[in-house]
Image: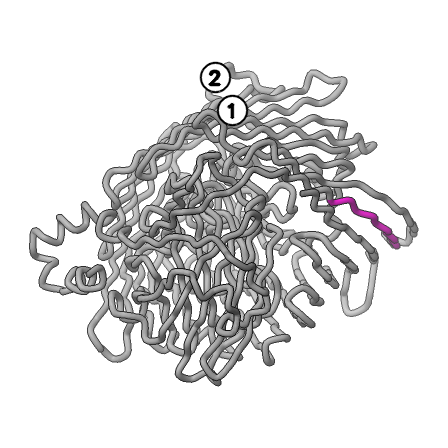
Amino acid sequence: MIALRWQSFQKPYLLKNKLFLFLILFQTSLFSQNSTNATLATANPIIDGNVLDDMAWNNANVITNFTQKSPDEGEPSSEKTIVKLIYSAKFLYVSVVCYDSNPNGIVISDSRRDAPLNNTDSFMFVLDTFKDQQNGYVFGTNAAGIEYDAQVIGGDGMSMNSSRQSVGVGANLNINWDASWEVKTIIGDFGWSAEFAIPFKTLRFSSQENQNWGINFQRNIAQKNEQSFWAPIPRQFSLNRLSLAGNVTGINIPSSRNIKIMPYALGLSNDANKEDVKSDETKSDFGFDAKIGITSSLNLDVTYNTDFAQVEADEQQINLDRFSLFFPEKRSFFLENAGLFSSGENTFYGPDIEMFFSRRIGIANDGSLVPILGGGRLTGEMGGFKIGALNMQTKEVKNIAKAENYGVYRIRKELPNRTNFGALITSKNVLNSRANNRAYALDGAYGIGETIQLKGFLATSDLPADSDNNGDSYAYMLEANRNTQALTTQLRYSEVGKNFNPEMGYVRRLGYRKVLFRILNRTRPNDFYGILELRPHITYWSYWDFDGFQQSGYLHIDNHWEFRNGYRIDTAVNFIWEGVKSPFEIVNGVTVSNNSYANSELHTRFNSNLTKPISLIVVSKIGGFFSGNRRNTDTTFRFRLGERFTSEVISKYNDVSLPEGKFYTHLLRSRFTYAFTPQMYIQSLLQYNNQSDQWSMNWRFIWQQSAATGLYIVYNQTQDYDGIPTDLNIRSLVFKYSYLFDID
């Protein structure tokens, strides 16, 4: 019945019918009718991927009848998928059999933990354990048996932003969350199958009996570029749209302890040569993290002598503007439940304001590492509210940073239909100093039907110590969004005072008023020259200072041509305005003068089928740039060999010609990964930046045993290079081992 209604919903003639509007307003009732019941296991399954021969699954309810989101929206999935759920006192078990009429065509694009699952044969499911339609957990795998997990925050699930959802404010998907669970897969003549074992203590849920959770399942068939769901999802949303999930009932979970202790031991060797001054350092260290489940819905994380030596190095960036760059957080302790502490204003390209920017902790302004003594984080639900409290203490580093205490405190009330209201406080205290800072924020969202959401944000902060103004330390944002299958519209207004100063946060620029407008259409032609979807859209934003001077403006007119064979072409024109009040040095020796500049540029993007062993992405911009012209080309080349070796080479090139001077910038980045197993792999990141004229490399051998624990061997080198090594050569070698003690 659901499939029939969905198919009729897709008929073009209904676009002109009042019934279309009715269905839009009541999509929730239409798409969330799927329901199943979890079965108590009579015997625990053997987690080896062999679902068909495991009798433990025989009495479980069968979940099938998947519906396509792409390429043929609303049609039944082209291949049969069978999912089953059972549970024991400690585990939720999920099995899937992905039948495939061409098993030789199964695509495995990567074998690393948390590798993307969008360009490979894969299976994922989401659990909304509080049934609040805003917070959830995603688990997934591909035919190679990798572990993929993530946290859903907000439940918005806009598919167009999926590649950016783990970065910045309002991030709806935290892919860096790592839990302790197990999955195994096998490939056979039938296709492939998988078995999941999810410990209940990995999740957070209410204490009531007979749990009722939101749940949905997604299967990707790479050779057909097909994506299908158990509870149907319209084209503008993703699996993370929790309000459209189905239901699973009948889970009764006994209370249990949840204590995990993860100690580590570390050995480090540094060899530095800076301008003929050599220094050598060797040291050993230890510390630990711990997780304590206070209740089934409230968790305490504790860390001592926190170390992140195993984390991949930052990706270098080239700044051709006068505003600060944003580098995303990669340290695991700060990434878990990061969405709860998020408050501010996000853009399609990253945050304008992040009230709590965790990279302020343990990383100095010059990029130097500052030792973290320890800290704690309390997160979960209490009294019907989401709460969060984090406190961290750093050590003093002579001539770099003083000892500092950081605190962030969060409370949020979540209501039905993507509605929530919250408050956040950040506190930075410099020990033995009066140089302290506080910042305060209120935020909220209000959902209207399934398609409309209103958002707001208001913040203030202590004034900077050197400020001679008693005001203008504020920021606020108002936004309205409407998302239907055919049309997405967004309207936003925001202001930031010139003295706004959240020292624990990130603020890209100060002293402005901003207007943002976006409208995007999705059209799916019926068998028209292989086109799957057309997405014409217009985006406009502009920043003005409080004197009415336009700081920046951008008008983007574009159309995405997405083809059924996986290819995509974007054709756009950009109109750009820049108002420079104070001259700035864009590169060494070239200064952009104070003036108002108006330019235009042609903007194109091309990608081949990203599911293939060899693929290419090329983005090009050609046109005016400040007082002259620029040619920009960003190229990404990907190559994989089998399921074990993957590689990516990225080139970002700018050729700039200004009356003030000519220059070019080139950032070259390459990644290579070889996976011995989904838990054991070696990965390299090599980068060259001609602005600093430096090569850097980051090599990591990783043998993960559970979640983020295991053996890490990391080699880093940074080197000046002008044909031959000069001036700078820094090398470090790290051995780190951590182990999980899971106390039941």
**In the image, residue 55 lies at what x, y percent?**
50, 68
Horizontal side of 303 relative to 378 (left or right) equals right
Residue 263, magenta (yes or no) = yes
Judge whether 280 appears above or below 704 on screen. above
Q: Residue at horizontal 42%, vertical 68%?
A: 220
Give the SS element for disc 2.
Answer: loop
Residue 182, magenta (yes or no) = no
In the orientation shown, which residue stands out farthest toward the left?
17
Q: Quadrant of residue 522?
A: bottom left
Residue type, label 2: Gly
Q: How many labels does the image show?
A: 2
Give the SS element for disc 1.
Answer: loop
Q: In which quarter of the image is residue 480?
A: top left
Mark 2 Cα shell of 10 Å, populated few (<14), some (14-19), many (≥20): some
**In the image, residue 506 lies at what x, y percent?**
55, 36
Does residue 598 show up?
A: no
Q: Residue at horizontal 56%, vertical 16%?
A: 468
Residue nearest the viewer, comparing 63 with 397: 63
Does residue 640 show up?
A: yes
Tell me which colouring the rendered structure shows. one colour
Residue nearest the viewer, comparing 272 with 628: 272
Do tag 2 and tag 1 residues touch (Cβ < 8 Å)? Answer: yes
Q: Residue at horizontal 51%, vertical 42%?
A: 253
Residue nearest the viewer, comparing 353 with 420: 420
Question: For the magenta stretch, what is the residue range?
Answer: 262-271
**In the image, residue 340 lies at what x, y percent?**
50, 36
Question: Residue under circle 2?
Answer: 471
Chief secondary structure of the magenta span?
A: strand
Question: Residue under circle 1?
Answer: 499
Horizontal side of 4 relative to 607 (left or right) equals left
Judge whether 281 appears above or below 662 on screen. above
Residue type, label 1: Asn
